[in-house]
Image (spheres, rainbow, N blue to C red):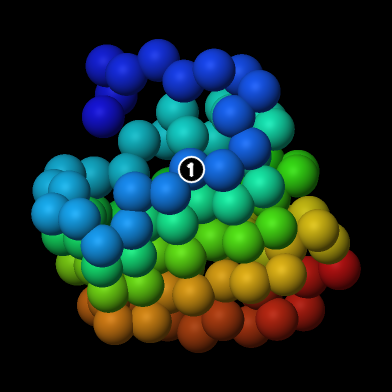
Amino acid sequence: PSDMEYPSSLTHFNLGANIIRGTLSPLLGQLQSLQVVDLHGNQISGNLPSSLVDIKTLQELDLSGNQLTGTIPETWGSFSSSLRKLDLGKNDITGNADSICSAD
């Protein structure tokens, strides 16, 4: 939720397999210490926020099993080389992943 405050030292954000509804806040990209974001198996809708690439420490991003729509943001091609796992399965995302696959 956009009205929540998160500690700047937060490294793992796991709310997977709940019944969370709503959209992903672009403010998530301001949590610069995050290593793992796991929001799989919820009812999150809307577009993928381009701000997630701002998290240079991000190693795992699991948004699978939601109701996300739209295209993969072009900015996602600049994900840090620290990103090891990206799971967007079981959503309604369109487009191709060329920019992500060619990221450094």
Quarter of the image with the C terminus is bottom right
Give coordinates of residue 91: x percent, y percent.
27, 76
Q: Amino acid at mark 1?
A: Phe
Residue highlighted by disc 1:
13
Give coordinates of residue 9: x percent, y percent.
66, 23
Residues 90 and 100: in front is 90
- Residue at position x 27%, y 74% from top? 65
Instruction: Judge whether 16 appears above or below 35 on screen.
Output: below
**Residue 89 quadrant:** bottom left
Residues 72 and 14: in front is 14
- Residue at position x 55%, y 35% from top? 29
In this rendering, would 32 be left or right of 91? Answer: right
In this rendering, would 74 be left or right of 62? Answer: right
Give coordinates of residue 1: x percent, y percent.
26, 29
- Residue at position x 42%, y 74% from top? 88
In this rendering, would 14 be left or right of 92? Answer: right
Instruction: Judge whether 7 appears above or below 11 on screen.
Output: above
**Residue 40 quadrant:** bottom left
- Residue at position x 49%, y 75% from top? 87
Instruction: Judge whether 9 appears above or below 15 on screen.
Output: above
In this rendering, would 90 be left or right of 30? Answer: left
* Residue 13 visible in image: yes
Report the number of numbered marks. 1
Residues 60 and 71: in front is 60
